[in-house]
Amino acid sequence: MTDPRPPRGLGRPKDAEKRRAIVAAAKRLFVKSGYDGVTMEQVAASAGVAKMTVYGHFHDKEALFEAVVRSSADGMIATLAAIHGVDGDMEAALAAFGTAFVGMVLDPEMVSASYRLFDQLSRHPSLAERFHEAGPGRMRVTLAAFLADAANRGTLAIDDTREAAADLLSLWVGDMQQSLAFGLIPPLTPAQIDHRVRRGIQVFLRAYAPV
């Protein structure tokens, strides 16, 4: 007699799909309305799932926000690791990572959301810590590890890889977020982003070239 029950684990891909839909919906809402302006009910409605499904994946809004930040960082971290792991081309890996990073942080919608978010994070210390650890802090640590590998191979001369990572990120972004937020400059084109990233890499490589 055939067992009518579905095989164990059959629902897992569907659950993963729902989780991705929840995270994507939450990201759209957080960017549009900020952390304080979003409810779990709104996320559920936007994702097309029940509110209890959202809570089944994320026990509170802080956990959901952390997942959104982590997912945004994952792609850039994977890009850096994948390109470097294939052929060891340091400049290509940095350019790919930098293009993704600059494209995200200097996106006009993201710039507006960031300024709104900074004000809200100042009122939520625990959330600010989770935001940093899941996103900016993790990307900086990953970039620092990448630079440490280059230093160990003698490609770069670096005494503090975390500071070097901060230097490179600063070269890429500079004061552009503020200029965009104040409407002093128009949004950057892909060609301008590429130029900024590659110029920053060249300046960085000259600064940290082995003696």
Image (cartoon, helix red, strand yellow):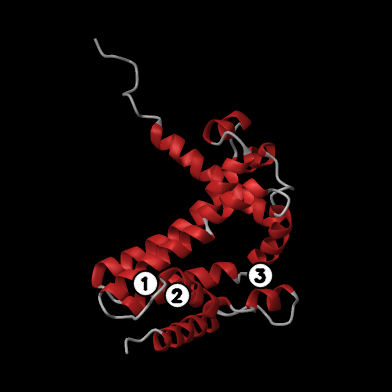
Answer whether residue 24 is visible to the viewer in this image. no
Residue sitting at x 69%, y 56%: 32
Mark 2 element type:
helix
The residue to which callout 2 is attached is 164
Residue sitting at x 41%, y 77%: 95
- Assess whether mark 1 and mark 2 are in contact (beta carbons under 8 angstroms): yes
The residue to which callout 1 is attached is 147
Answer whether residue 144 is visible to the viewer in this image. yes
User: Mark 2 or 1 closer to N-term?
Assistant: 1
Residue sitting at x 26%, y 14%: 2
Question: Label 1, label 3: how many angstroms apart (C-alpha)?
Answer: 29 Å
Indicate which label's residue lies in the foreground, 2 or 3.
Answer: 2
Q: Is residue 149 above or below residue 172?
A: above
Question: Label 2, label 1: how many angstroms apart (C-alpha)?
Answer: 8 Å
Write down the quadrant of residue 15 in the picture: top left
In the rendering, at what x and y percent does residue 119 appear? 74, 58
Write down the quadrant of residue 45 in the picture: top right
